């Protein structure tokens, strides 16, 4: 597993670089815990599925972030390209398959797409582990996903709270 304080700092840096409004403490915590729950910061490829990277973002989700949100916010999509070191042409491309490789190989892109998935939710970010578990299940893992709120709480307790002792 990756060093959690380093990953938290990296997430905070990436989010601040795309814009300070994306880098609130609760947002950093939610992205960090999402990575813990989704991959334990060990897996970059879903065992039996299309999700990629530590945040297990599906290429279709990344594509939707781009075509339904980012393409209408030109300064933001340019910032995403700059921060992730991915050409703007890839960020504006309609080729969903490009995201398969990008999400697997580019940590910054995974952080950005995880944050954008949550950013587009019309609800306040939670501040407690239990609140994050519910938020993650409803808006990130969804009813179709295999994840459970209890799994979120167990993973965060084991890998984050125990790590701080």
Image (cartoon, grey):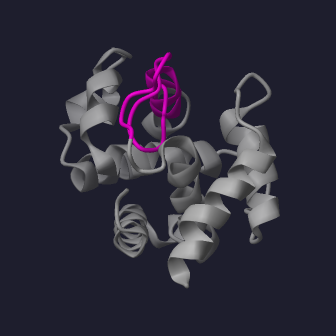
Q: Is residue 143 above or below residue 110?
A: above
Q: Quadrant of residue 52?
A: top left
**Is residue 18 toward the left or the right of residue 28 in the image?**
left
Q: Quadrant of residue 5?
A: bottom left
List x then y, in percent, for residue 92. Answer: 33, 29
Between 114 and 147, the residue placed more toward the observer is 147
Is any part of residue 54 visible from this angle? yes
**Is residue 80 toward the left or the right of residue 152 in the image?**
left
Image: magenta residue range: 43-66
> Any magenta on residue 164?
no
List x then y, in percent, for residue 126. Answer: 76, 65
Which residue is pictured at 49% across the width and 26% down the height?
Answer: 58
Extreme residue in the bottom direction? 165
Is any part of residue 115 visible from this angle? no
List x then y, in percent, for residue 140. Answer: 66, 39
What secondary structure prevails in the magenta region?
loop
Which residue is pictured at 70% across the width and 26% down the height?
Answer: 145
List x then y, in percent, for residue 1. Answer: 37, 56
Tell me how many marks there are: 0
Which residue is pictured at 18% across the width and 48% down the height?
Answer: 85
**Is residue 14 toward the left or the right of residue 157 in the image?**
left
Which residue is pictured at 77% across the width and 70% down the height?
Answer: 128
Between 18 and 57, the residue placed more toward the observer is 57
> Any magenta on residue 45?
yes
Q: Is residue 40 above or below residue 145?
A: below
Where's the C terminus, which quadrant?
bottom right
Q: Is residue 130 above or below residue 97?
A: below
Between 130 and 160, the residue placed more toward the observer is 160
């Amino acid at each position: 597993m990756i060093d959690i304080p380093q990953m938290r700092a990296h997430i905070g840096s990436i989010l601040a670089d795309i814009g300070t409004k994306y880098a609130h403490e609760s947002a950093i915590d939610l992205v960090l815990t999402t990575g813990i729950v989704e991959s334990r910061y060990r897996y970059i490829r879903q065992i039996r599925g299309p999700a990629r990277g530590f945040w297990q973002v599906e290429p279709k989700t990344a594509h939707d972030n781009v075509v339904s949100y980012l393409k209408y916010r030109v300064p933001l999509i340019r910032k995403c390209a700059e921060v992730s070191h991915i050409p703007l042409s890839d960020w504006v491309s309609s080729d969903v398959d490009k995201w398969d490789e990008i999400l697997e190989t580019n940590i910054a892109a995974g952080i950005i797409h995880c944050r954008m998935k949550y950013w587009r939710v019309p609800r306040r970010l939670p501040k407690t582990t239990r609140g994050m578990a519910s938020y993650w299940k409803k808006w990130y893992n969804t009813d179709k996903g295999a994840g459970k709120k209890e799994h979120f709480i167990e993973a965060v307790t084991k890998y984050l709270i125990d790590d701080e002792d």
